[in-house]
Amino acid sequence: MMVHSFTVSAPSRLHFGMFSFGQAGTRQFGGVGAMVRPPAMELRLSADAAFHVIGPGAERIRAIAGTVAERLGCGELPGVRLEVHSAAPAHRGLGSGTQMALAVAAGLRAWLGLEPADAAELARLTGRGERSAVGAHGFIEGGLIVEAGKRSPRELGPRVARTPVPEAWRWLLIGRPEGGGLAGEAERRAFARLPPVPRTTTAELSRLALLRLLPAAAAADFEDFSDAVTQFGRLAGECFAAVQGGPYVDAGTAELVEAVRRQGVAGVGQSSWGPTVFALAPDEAAARDLRQRLSRTVGDGIEIQIAQPDNRGAILSPG
């Protein structure tokens, strides 16, 4: 190995909603999302006598690393000390599991002297992308991602469009520290209960993504993007009403969305299964002002973090 140590830093993922599921003859899942940081997944790899992990999620990371090594045909894990310096909280709708897994896979490939892999290969190595591919594509290149969904269970939904999000914009990540969105087997059972997304809904979500969200971000049209992201999230969320009871994961989250909108915010929604609510501000000063106002109005126990758009994706750096 040419370098003594290096760090992999990956952004978090906001997911605005899916295009489709349950309809025969139609691509499954797909959807739109954007990459942000903080929070970020940061792993440091350095040489050691044997492989071991230090920090939160150590057991899970070791299992991921074992799977990656097996699929790379390594036989055993290399002598690497893997330290978790930071990580997004799990099951908050921020794509933390995917970013952790892909960071481990990218880090081990680099340690072994292999060429950087694309999103599909990293997903194959880690078993990610069972439904959404936004986080996998966003890991590679950041920005606002539109992915088309999959025709077969084993493929990763292709990225059909990507554009940077204006650097001045800010995302407020709002939620309570307790509770968490669905994941794993609970998520699979939830999808089994959901009725198919109507084709007319898929068509309208596709129109919002391709004719409003993407061009508004490319043109830095904050007002149109804000209105479109709220419409997209609410319509996509209604497809989950059989499980959630409405467009948001629970009544508390729906109330939080309305509280944000009462502050004059046009762009607000739930990321993935939640419970994180996102709100869009045009710049840092507006984001700080909104955070102060929300802190006074949404009650105790609500955490608010200001995040920047991430248009780079994961970064591997020496040291």
Image: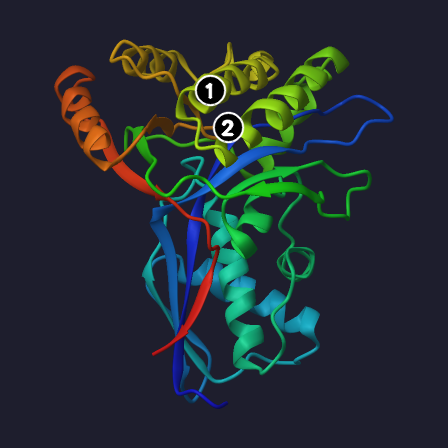
Name the one closer to the observer, 66 or 36. Answer: 36
**Dot label at residue 224:** 1
User: In which quarter of the view is residue 126 placed?
Assistant: bottom right
The amino acid type, in three-letter code, at marker 2 is Ala
Q: CA distance from mark 2 to mark 1?
A: 6 Å
| Residue 102 placement (x, y as % from top left) | 54, 59
Tell me which residue sits at (39%, 66%) in the image: 43
Residue 237 figure quarter: top right
Callout 2 secondary element: helix
Task: List x then y, in percent, for residue 18.
Answer: 62, 27
Q: Is residue 312 above or below residue 300?
A: below
User: Residue at (38%, 13%) from the top-left corner?
Assistant: 254
Q: Residue 199, image x and y in percent?
A: 76, 15
- Residue 97 pos. (x, y %): 49, 49
Which structural element holds mark 1? Answer: helix
Q: Please tell me in which quadrant of the rendered image residue 117 appears.
A: bottom right
97 relative to 287, above or below:
below
Which of the numbered marks, if any, corresponds to residue 216? 2
Residue under the image location 48 percent in, 55 percent down:
313
80 left or right, relative to 305: right
Q: Residues within 10 Å of mark 1 (few under 14, many from 20)?
A: some
The circle drawn on residue 250 is none
Q: Are marks 2 and 1 in contact (CB under 8 Å)?
A: yes
State the residue in front, 9 or 176.
9
Among numbered discs 2 and 1, the one appearing first in the sequence: 2
Q: Nearer the viewer, residue 158 or 4?
A: 158
In the rendered picture of this protein, how many numbered marks are placed on residues?
A: 2
Residue 153 left/right relative to 69: right
Residue type at tag 1: Asp
